[in-house]
Amino acid sequence: MQNNTAMPTFPRRLVQHGAVRPDKPAFREKYLGIWQTWTWQDVNAEVRALACGLAAIGFQRGMNLAIIGDNRPRLYWAMLAAQSLGGVPVPLYQDAPAADMAYVLQDAHIQYAIVEDQEQVDKLLELKALYPHVAHIAYDDERGMRHYHQPELISFAGLQALGREYDRDHPGFFEAAVEAGRGTDSAVILYTSGTTGKPKGVCQSHTALLCAGEGGVAFDKLTDNEDILSYLPMAWVGDCLFSLAQAMVAGFTVNCPESGDTVMIDMREIGPTCYFAPPRVFENMLTSVMIRMEDASSIKRRIFSHFMDVAKRCGAQILDGKQVSLADRLSYQVGNVLVYGPLKNVLGLSRVRVAYTAGAAIGPDLFRFYRSIGVNLKQLYGSTETCAYVCLQPDGNIKFDSVGLPAPGVEVKLAANGEVLVKSQATMSGYYHRPEATAEVIDADGYFHTGDAGVFDSEGHLKIIDRAADVGKLNCGAIFAPNYIENKLKFFPFIKEVVAFGHGRDQVCAFINIDIEAVGNWSERRGIAYAGYTDLAAREETYGLIRDCIEQVNAELAADPLMDRTQIHRFLVLHKELDPDDDELTRTRKVRRKFIAEKYAVLIAALYEGKTSQFIETQVKFEDGRTGSTSADLQIWSSKTWPALGLAA
């Protein structure tokens, strides 16, 4: 039998960093405008006190600990403290309403929770009617908590004080608890986004997560000198990979912003060297750039346009170290001084050596934009069940339409129906207390069935077409991949979300969500008044703007022999933004297609029946849990399409 000490776990990694690099910064947090720093030695002491505090109030090996809040060093320490005792942290989405949290708390059998602040405490107290089993709640931020006297409550500082006393009274307890840990123990339970049903708890072992962390760190040569900004939900596998697994492998510094509203400011101050964000964040960054350029002088706009053309022509090739003409190289250097460098500085990307995106497909145009200005952006491909570790893109061999090559130690193959199958040490142990569901996705040979449809190109790069369940066919027999079309449209700063329809139909139609900031700025510059989102979405000028975007995409689709039949014929602009609180998106902002198709069936029917308008009344949920309704008479417009290549021939 393998000795436990030879099996890496997160607590053992933490102890090792405390010994090897005790004085190097491990965590930073901006508080009241000032960056606070904790070294690896400090973090070891903090985690030890917290772990002993949890033991003092009865937390034991095998128990689950709920973690709820924004990215805070103390919440990461809570994860490490639970792991030190052989327990399992269960991070929850901090913006989820109380009712949504109840399901995860019940499914994971939660009795202990460590939360950020009064808001999260109030949610758990409100939940007592639905789930009364949370017996201990520790809170980090003590503001607003003075008059809370419930017996289950204790401050984070108070819990650590108990822990220091427990540590003194039980010498050797902490070391023995860490020593008892095994690599096969569950290190975390992460709940899936629930695009097709209730979320499932994904159990990832220490070995699986650290394997993914080691693979990524070695692949891109990350060191303990990296700085990352930790701002994505702690319940998301991407944050777990970068802010926990890779940090515990490489020993670099994790920086937590002051709040969600200050992320961009804090990012410019930190200047991360390694950056991770889903496509939506990169889309929002580009939208902010385009809005700023609309407000710039005509000279600045012409300079920007000229050098962006240069970047589009040769920027990605220069980044990949490929040959370009001397004239282009000189023009690009001038552009770097005048445009690309200042632009990266504004976005906080000046020091980034490598940037990653994952969680959804990124449009090739958006991908090309960042690489063209010198940001080494790469796509990751993975899922919660695979620790977000399946494919990686090697430097110098980046393809805009692929997710790269299988990562080191990962086997990837395609099933007969084109579904991507994955096998590696980073695959989950299983779904929490759901052996039947686990057996449905992990076959007898140990391959995880991702549910994604893909193809390999001639060089072995994997291309993800869409979710296998979402790929369909038009009545003419053409492949219909909605995500491919939607991503092309979301490259435009005016479009925030798209839902395309076409499977089993004669043509493609779409719902559009506008980006109110970008479209609002565009409207104000043209003297167009509007009262709010619903009013702006209904204006003819907005419809004309969106139709121009759709027709540009249709022209691109017409030139693609695989997608030329899937041009968008008719569309409408929704009267409300798709919202996770209304169950239209997951917490990771993935479209819940089936739910939307059922909820807005009357609008889909109107699109395909040739109507020019349709009235709809929609139920909505507010942040405080109340419900209401909103209604509108939506216009339906047609867009220009081009002859398909096959027809043109």
Image: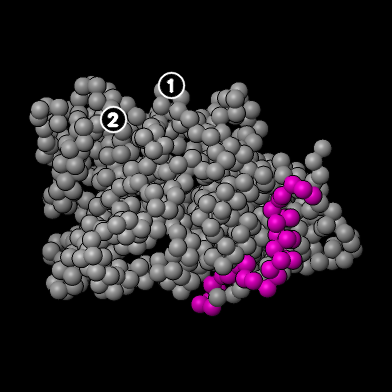
The amino acid type, in three-letter code, at marker 2 is Phe
Determine which residue is flagged by label 2. 480
Q: Nearer the viewer, residue 232 or 349?
A: 349
- Left/right placement of residue 124 relative to residue 622 reads right
Range drawn in magenta: 5-34
Q: Are marks 2 and 1 in contact (CB under 8 Å)?
A: no
Which residue shows up at 13% across the image and 40% down it? 639
Residue 137, given in percent of the width and then of the height, sits at 68, 56
Q: Nearer the viewer, residue 345 or 36?
A: 345
Which residue shows up at 59% across the image and 65% down it? 224
Which residue shows up at 39% across the image and 53% down it? 396
The amino acid type, in three-letter code, at marker 1 is Ala
Dot 2 or dot 1: first in sequence order is 1
Determine which residue is flagged by label 1. 416
Residue 115 is tagged as none
Residue 104 seen in render: no
- Left/right placement of residue 548 relative to residue 491 reads left
Image vertical order of residue 207 relative to residue 55, above or below: above
